[in-house]
Amino acid sequence: MKVFEGRWLGGVVLALAMSATGAVPVVKTVPWVASNPLIPHDTWSGKAVTLKGTSDQYGASIQWTWDFGDGSPVATGTVTSANLYALESSHTYVGSDGTTFTARLTVANGATGESASQTYYVKISTKSLPVEVNVAIDEGLWALHKGMTRSTSGGVNYGNWTSWSSYYSLTPANIMAFEVNGHLESGVAGNPYTETVKRAMNELFTRLTTFNPTVQTLGDPDANDNNIAIKVNQGDHYYQTGMFMDALIASGTPEAVAPTGPANVVGRTYKEIVQDMVDFYSWGQYDSGSPVRGGWRYSDNQAPDNSVGQWAAIGMIPAERHWGCVIPAWVKTANRNWLVYSQKTVSPYTFGYTDSNPIWTGTFAVTPSGMVQLAWQGLGRGHLGWDRAETYLRDNFGVTGGSYDTNIKKFYYGLFAFVKAMLLHDSNEDGVAEPIVMLQSSTPGVTPVDWYSAETNSVPPYQPLGVNHLEGVARTLVNAQLANKTWGSPPAAVVDGNELDYYTAWAIIMLQRTLFESGAPVAVAKATPNPAVAGQVVQLDGSASYHQDSGKAIDSWEWDLDNDGTYDVTGPFASVSFPALGSYPVKLRVTDDASPEASATTFVTVVVSIPPLAPSADAGGPYHFCPQSVPWFLDGTGSTNPDDGQSEPHVPPYPGDAIVSYAWDLDGNGVFDNASGAQPDVTAYFSGLPAGNHVIGLKVTDRTATSFPSSNLPDQSDTDSAVVTVHARTDPECVCVDNLAARAKIFGVPALPTVQLTWTPKAGAHHYNVYRGTVAGGPYLKIGSTTSSYAVFTDNGAGIGLTVGQTYYYVIRQADALDRELCQSNEASARPRNR
């Protein structure tokens, strides 16, 4: 039996199931990365963060429980109709950098005994601007999710933010905040935001209307010749329609079909709908020619203003660049004339409102808007109009205090336009964005500034040396987030109270630095060892970089090893060394396989210092455990100690520093007490768990206190995490090499004892990693890899030599192009012999 609660919402009765006898609750937790829920949410030690989840059942007998995974008391409560979409709990994690905790949300039906749980991963990192940005976005998206008004009509789920604003375009603005972070309506069902975005998309189409676009003075606006134009079914549609276009394009699904909406909307593809929105803007462009044609305002063919113009451009830029929609040439020509007319010809060369003069909202509303329109035209750096406007913004970028008319960073309407202009900049009219990183000026003595990452008194890698250290967009927005995790006033200045409704979505989009794309590439760089000693080879690893959209992938890695702006080497792995003490930023740029391509960068700072130095943990992995290839081992032997073997002078000598402890956290509680040793056998632990994914941690500790007693330092530690996947026996991933054979041979001059391995290759393997041990069942050490299509490998002792009469045990592991091992073979053995 189901019990329903009826709720009036916008004239629609919303029916919510309170409980279902005998039904297992559906529990969902919010992933930080939609395409990979195993990537933890960021925090830093001592920071209170929100754990986020939902349930599909509520009622007096339905209880939720958050186990934070760090040994602290659980939080619990009753699931009600008011909180089933917001089962949240604030918690403060404390620990060393790199520690990952596995929290768990459980929903239990006390009346039936049914229950279900989902994990939620949180990782402690060093507090830095990128980490603060991640936390701000994470909390801001949850605020949007909680603020949605949900309803159901005719069996279709809807959602909007009408309690925030009467403007329809707030819904697509908020949708886009989710989409650019990879949370899509086409995402997995286990992500609560998938339903949130799907509800909002269903609502979006119902807010549209269609009409027949007639031929205008400058030409026919109906580019697809179907006699249909589409706009928002509300006033101020020239402001609003561009945001609807953006949300559709950011879905990344041009061939998806609208499930709702009026005739000529429902049942049509997203791309077809966007083209008809382009036709609407073409039709409504001002064409009377007094004083010049071009631009848009509040009504059809009305003499323009530069505030509205950006919203037409912001819709047509991705329509043309990403989805190939057609814009009549005369539309751009007229708009270009408008831009020339509306920009001052004397210093400060700002754009105006209805002419070259700004209105009371100030130049920071209309100048960035003019630059967005220039970006649409492909008129960027090198074009006089752009260079003059950019100079004005750079010259005033450091202004503090004031309000919207004197400080762009206090005016989010203008700031959002500015960010759009920087990201969409195109200087050669080829329709490919050339994003600007360093805001520059032609005014003598004014140096470029990183408009996004700059921080007051900052140091590399977030701000290059030799530039004015100003507060950029990221620091401004992070500091301005309110206690309820939204953005609004104060501290942002407000010109029109309706702006406040959009500030949270705009802030999230600005922090993400992504427009229109369904998620973005994310660069992740690791250096080992770090810290290091002078001259030591440091291994760089960018293989953990990922894409927020599961339909796209990273296919290019570039390393700037000396921070000179030039990329020196390519590939997911690289190495570097530095001859002297200091901190050395190394930059990684990754590029995806989208069209157009998108890139992301990050820095890892290699610290070169003198002993004693902390070790660098490497938990190995990702691990794939298949029941047909046991035992299962973890491998922490990649951990390094940069001052290994060194100690301070003493007679008799102190023992050299070394890693003396490998401690493993297998249950995600932040306590490293489940296994020990560099290569522990964890078969018993993981074979008792069901198939699934688990985040584990490794803590390595050296003997600094013994090797360097006068330093007065304790033994130093470092932590790292990895993913363990336990597969079912029938999992296709467990189609392992099962016929590995080993044969002892004599090879070479002089003759050396060797072992030759052979096997049948498996489809999909990029290469095979070869492991050798001296004990049956392992553990094993990696001795090499091969891409041989003949599936053969010869072991001659890797320069050390094999011992005659010693039995050696071998396994191989299939790996992909990023060296992620997928499966372990059977074990084979051989005993080298004399001739």
Image (tube, rainbow, N blue to C red):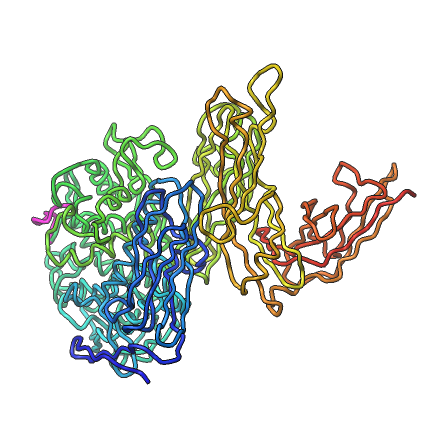
Magenta stretch: dominant secondary structure: loop
Q: Residue furthest left?
A: 360
Magenta residue check for 363: yes
Q: Quadrant of the C terminus?
A: top right
Q: Residue at x 37, y 69 (%)?
A: 108
Residue 477 can be seen, yes or no: yes
Please provide percent x and percent y for residue 32: 38, 56
Magenta residue check for 643: no
Q: Is residue 621 above or below residue 86?
A: above
Q: Is residue 770 above or below residue 111?
A: above
Q: Relative to 805, is 447 on the left or the right?
A: left
Q: Relative to 677, is 191 on the left or the right?
A: left
Please provide percent x and percent y for residue 42: 38, 49
Please provide percent x and percent y for residue 813: 66, 55
Question: Which contiguous range is marked in magenta?
Answer: 354-364
Q: Quadrant of the N terminus?
A: bottom left
Judging depth in this view, the residue of 171 and 358 nearest the camera is 171
Q: Residue at x 24, y 41 (%)?
A: 390
